[in-house]
Image (cartoon, rainbow, N blue to C red):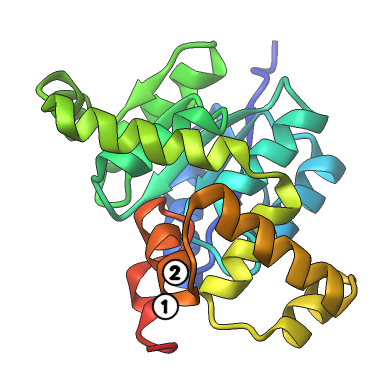
Amino acid sequence: MTMKRITVLLAEDHTIVREGFRKMLEFEDDLEVVGEAQDGRQAIALANKLRPDVILMDIAMPQLNGLEATRQVLKALPSIKVLMLSAHNDDAYVKNATESGAMGFLLKQTSAHEVCRAIREIHSGKKFFSSSVSRRQDRLHPSSLNRAGSLAKDATRLTSREMEVLQLIAEGKANKETAAELGIGIKTVEKHREHLMRKLDIHDTAGLTRYAIGAGIIESSVQLTIV
């Protein structure tokens, strides 16, 4: 009898990293890469088209981050399992990943063996975290937990559209560019910006950018292009 493979969608904006994961998974008889996405929007489109068992989802991607992409995918296709990837072992990143619906969290420097094990574990319905993340969670200081929880709570108060607008603002897009990217009017973008600032109690673009970095919505390197 032919073994049914676990189908995997790779969502990662860095081509060299994506290719590395593909080559890694090609050695496994029970795992099959069925598609590759380079941003969150493409990940959503391919998830709907391919219906993979598991998505290996990078948190920080252009246009739409992995957190919001995960929420939108799972809203439409709740049976898909998401394994979140990040280069950062930050409490807030882990908390926000799980709040978005991800079944696991892996650091990008994780070994090939652990990545494959994680895919199999979450496919079977179990949660999985990189060993260093698990150890960190076990010894978290209460203040760290409070900070991470606060960021996650703020993020869950935002609508999907507000999250999209927040990311584009943090990436340095002007209102006109954001409107064109999302296919909405400039006045609508301005209204979303007002709602974001009121909900998050943040009153300038720099503050929104710092929040987006702290929540793992964009990488800190993006900030360098707008300050």
Q: Earlier in the sequence, mark 1 or mark 2?
A: 2
Q: Nearer the viewer, residue 118 or 68?
A: 68
Q: Is residue 15 above or below residue 226?
A: above
Camera sees residue 115: no
Q: Is residue 41 above or below residue 205?
A: above
| Residue at the image position 61 percent from the left and 57 percent from the top | 196
The percent position of residue 147, horizontal first and vertical second, equals 28, 38
Camera sees residue 186: yes
Using a 10 Å C-alpha cutoff, classify the residue at mark 1 as few (fewer than 14 neighbours), some (14 to 19) or many (20 or more).
some
| Residue at the image position 57 percent from the left and 28 percent from the top | 101
Q: Distance of mark 1 from mark 2, alpha carbons?
A: 9 Å
Q: Quadrant of residue 194?
A: bottom right
Q: Is residue 203 above or below residue 4?
A: below
The percent position of residue 132, horizontal first and vertical second, equals 16, 34
Q: Where the C terminus falls, by quadrant?
A: bottom left
| Mark 2, secondary structure of its residue | helix
Q: Where the N terminus falls, by quadrant?
A: top right
Residue assigned mark 1: 222
Q: Nearer the viewer, residue 2 or 34?
A: 34
| Residue at the image position 49 percent from the left and 63 percent from the top | 19
Q: Are marks 1 and 2 in contact (CB under 8 Å)?
A: yes
Using a 10 Å C-alpha cutoff, classify the residue at mark 2 as few (fewer than 14 neighbours), some (14 to 19) or many (20 or more).
many
Instruction: Give the amino acid type for the residue marked by disc 2 in the picture.
Output: Thr
Residue assigned mark 2: 209
In the shown orientation, is residue 215 left or right of residue 103? left
Instruction: Give the amino acid type for the residue marked by disc 1 in the picture.
Output: Val
